[in-house]
Amino acid sequence: MPETVTQTASLLPSAVFCSGAAWQRDPAIFSGTDDTDVEDWLASYERVSAYNKWDDSVKLTNVIFYLSDVANLWFRNHEADISNWAALKTSLTEVFGRLAVRKLCAEQRLRSRAQQTGERFTSYIEDVVNLCKRVNPSMSEADKNRHIMKGIEDDAFQMLVAKDPQTVSGVIGYCQSFDELRKQRLSTRRAGYQEATLSSLALPQDGALDQPLLLQRIQQFVREEVAHQLSLSACPPMPAPSLTPNLQHVIEEQVAEVLPPPPQPPLIAAPLKYADAVVRSQPSPASPVYRPPTRQFEPQQPATPP
């Protein structure tokens, strides 16, 4: 009976995957050579471990698979000295996350942090708040607001100066409202942009041209002007559409300013043929020098009379 039980147990799979079980997540890789903060990585590793239901022993066993480069080399060199997960966290923080260096890097980034073109207000504000937390975990709301306003875009800065929010939450709320109003205003301006532009253009001298036809003529004139500027017209240009001279002059100036000057092709010498190379290597014959012929006989002197 015991042998039968043993054989049956050996045939059973060691683990059975259930379709409803949560899929395991993998922590990020820490190398110790880039700008990744070791404390942020440890917090992320702890969060993923809690999701995967890893205890401290499993955390310590699996950590080698999520270390690379210098961090992986350091762990393999000191693995025998690390007995538990708490000791590993302490050693990693001491080696790769010294408090003074971490604070100095955060201060440098906070000093030069500014909102980039196209960056959302939420992304910029949350990044500044995170840097403030690294520099001083107990930083006041007034100091955080000062760092936020120091690098925020000009329009939002003027709005925040007028509103004078006292908390970071207030800054976020005002910026979100400002962003929504600005989007609504831009969408409204785009809807009437075409009509406003066409109505402001000068009509031809006959004054009987409607807006669709005027737009068609302008597009045709712009295409011909661009082709002329880029020297793409192999044949003589077609007659320009009937536009006022002022409007034609404005379009020509705008196209000339937008398009870069055509690049000048570099001068490349033609490849030297073999016959030319042979002729060039031989010295040219010297030009013949003219020399007067020498006299063979002396001229006879006339006889002297007696």
Image (tube, rainbow, N blue to C red):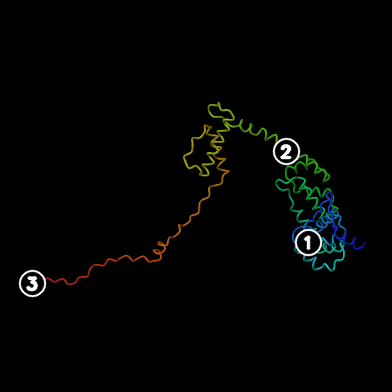
Q: Farthest residue in the right direction?
A: 1
| Residue to which mark 3 is pinned | 305
Within 10 Å of disc 1 (Cα), the crowding (few <14, some 14-19, many 20+) is: some
| Residue to which mark 1 is pinned | 67
Q: Residue at x 52, y 41 (%)?
A: 227
Q: CA distance from mark 3 to mark 2?
A: 131 Å
Within 10 Å of disc 3 (Cα), the crowding (few <14, some 14-19, many 20+) is: few
Image x and y of residue 183, in percent: 73, 38
Task: Locate the C terminus by quadrant.
Answer: bottom left
Image x and y of residue 203, in percent: 56, 29
From the image, state whether disc 3 or disc 2 is nearer to you.
2
Instruction: Report the disc number at residue 183.
Output: 2
Instruction: Classify residue 252 by image quadrant.
Output: top right
Q: Residue at x 40, y 64 (%)?
A: 278
Sequence-first tag of 3 and 2: 2
Within 10 Å of disc 2 (Cα), the crowding (few <14, some 14-19, many 20+) is: few
Q: CA distance from mark 3 to mark 1?
A: 132 Å
Q: What SS does tag 2 mark? A: helix
Confirm or deny contact between disc 3 and disc 1 (CB under 8 A). Answer: no
Q: Farthest residue in the bottom direction?
A: 306
From the image, state whether disc 3 or disc 1 is nearer to you.
1
From the image, state whether disc 1 or disc 2 is nearer to you.
1
